[in-house]
Image: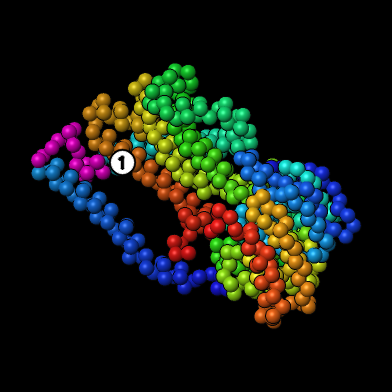
Amino acid sequence: MSAPLSAPAAARQTHGSRPLLLLRILLPVIVLTAGIAAWEFVVRVNEIPPYVLPAPSVVFQTLVGDWAVLSGSLLTTLSTTLQGFLAAAVGGIVLALLFNQSKWLEYSLFPYAVILQVTPVIAIAPLLLIYLPQQTAVVACAWIVAFFPVLSNTTLGLNSVDRNLAGLFQLYGASRLQTLAYLKLPAALPYILGGLRIAGGLSLIGAVVAEIAAGSAGAGSGLAYRIAESGYRLNIPRMFAALLLLSAAGIVIYALLALTSHLVLRRWHESATGKDN
Amino acid sequence: MAEPAAHSGLGIPRAGLAVSLRGVTKVYDNGVAALGPLDLDVRKGEFVSLLGPSGCGKSTALRLIAGLSAPTSGSVSVVQASDGARIGFVFQEPTLMPWASVRENVRLPLKLSRVPAAQAAMRVGAALARVGLADFADAFPRELSGGMKMRVSLARALVTDPDILLMDEPFAALDEITRFRLNNDLLALWRSLNKTVIFVTHSVFESVYLSQRVIVMTARPGRIGAEFRIEAPEPRAEEFRTSADYAGYCRRVSGALAPSYQGPSVR
């Protein structure tokens, strides 16, 4: 019988992957720096006016100069995204659990979940804005876009339970609730986390789409609204600055969810453990 | 998914018997007749092996005894223990929860029957010690070797102190040395704990080494083809594995098994 913890193997792995990891961080940074430098160079040499294409330095100055306005908008968008994400997470998981407990419910409602998913949210947003208060409508848009991956992934996970483990629970007379809590939910966890990772980015998209739809209706203060507003005023540097913040927000959301997933799964799931065992 | 545990004709077997099957058949929904009719009596404390080719319904018989599926016809009676925890099941795969530590995996049957935590902890400790894994309680299944995982699975089956231990080709996926060791450990456990063991295997050598009685099953639908009583001095150990008696039993059991492997689908 071999030793249980393959510590030498683990050490070898980190040792072997360190240069690779460095490369994976370094290469995109080099590309980014080169891209920004080329952009700055082209703008300066051709003396392109900022209302056509602002140089990166101007965008950065705008970001700092307009921080009071932009940071407020960033907070608004992030709060909408967070609300939409939480609604999608709770809604998707709860709906999947209900579907798992009752086939009738699943057959009755699943087609509508699909319809909600395949109808472009940009087309639904104006309607929602008519019937719902603006903030509610924006959150609803974020929810519509984000809940489906949570629902379908959770459903997949709940149906992926090991048949023998299910038999074992049956043998020991586990109740429905025990089977759900101790078997189905833990087995579905990697799938749920995968769904949440997709939902995070999607709820930002949903929030932005709704803000743009709402913005053109004349109200709102999120980042997407700032982009639309700056567009009308030909304040192109501020458009870029707001866009930059949106990208950064998306990256941070993804990274946080990926980190959460890794921390939760690292002790047992293949996706988060070392590849060498 | 397995059907709910509805034993048709569930009853208490005759005195001295742990398990009694009468005219049991199993036909699956797709029309495949997997088993029977099968009559089988297992005495309390007996070690019986069901030996047969793959797909002969050995595992089906075990699942019927466990109540994991219901017979199409016939009756399955299993002796009832006072606390209801009458059966322990060891699958071919270790069937551990990968998200839970060894301790939590072994504790599962007690958790499901709501045994108080302090008592459960004690019994889990004892079960792990019995299979020699006391030091690995906090390890996760992926950190263990195949043999160790199987020991965890065995500890989990023993933790409820069942009267009957059902084992479905538990050591089939292990290397030979590990399998021999686990065979010896299982025999020692059986001797000291006085359980009824029904052991499904496709290995002639394993069945003869372990059992008091070897039941050879025919190809699908599985019926009893032959039965051998293995009269060997107890306690058995490695000497038995190399004895002439052992070789003789293996030859006769193999001979009885051969017809099951004949026919159009010989592999």
Check the residue under mark 1 and report the chain it is in: A
Residue at the spot 64% in from the left edge and 51% down from the top edge: B220
In this view of the protein, which residue sits in the foreground, A8 or A225?
A: A8
User: Which residue is farthest right?
Assistant: B15
Residue at the spot 68% in from the left edge and 67% down from the top edge: B253
State whether residue B165 appears in this view.
Answer: yes
Horizontal and vertical percent position of residue B143: 55, 65
Hey, what amino acid is under mark 1?
A: Leu
Residue underneath mark 1 = A244
Q: Which residues are magenta?
A: A46-60
Q: For the N terminus of chain B, which image quadrant?
A: top right
Horizontal and vertical percent position of residue A53: 18, 36
Horizontal and vertical percent position of residue A114: 47, 29
Horizontal and vertical percent position of residue B103: 66, 62
Up-down: is B232 above or below A151?
Answer: below
Q: Is residue B109 left or right of residue A259?
A: right
State whether residue B117 appears in this view.
Answer: no
Q: Residue A246 lies in magenta, yes or no?
A: no
Up-down: is A222 above or below B171?
Answer: above
Within-10-Å neighbours for mark 1: few <14, some 14–19, many 20+: some
Q: Is residue A55 left or right of residue B51?
A: left
In this view of the protein, which residue sits in the foreground, B94 or A14?
A: B94
Residue at the spot 85% in from the left edge and 48% down from the top edge: B11
User: Which residue is farthest top?
Assistant: A130
Q: Is residue B198 left or right of residue B80?
A: left
User: Which residue is farthest left?
Assistant: A46
Secondary structure beneath dot 1 equals helix
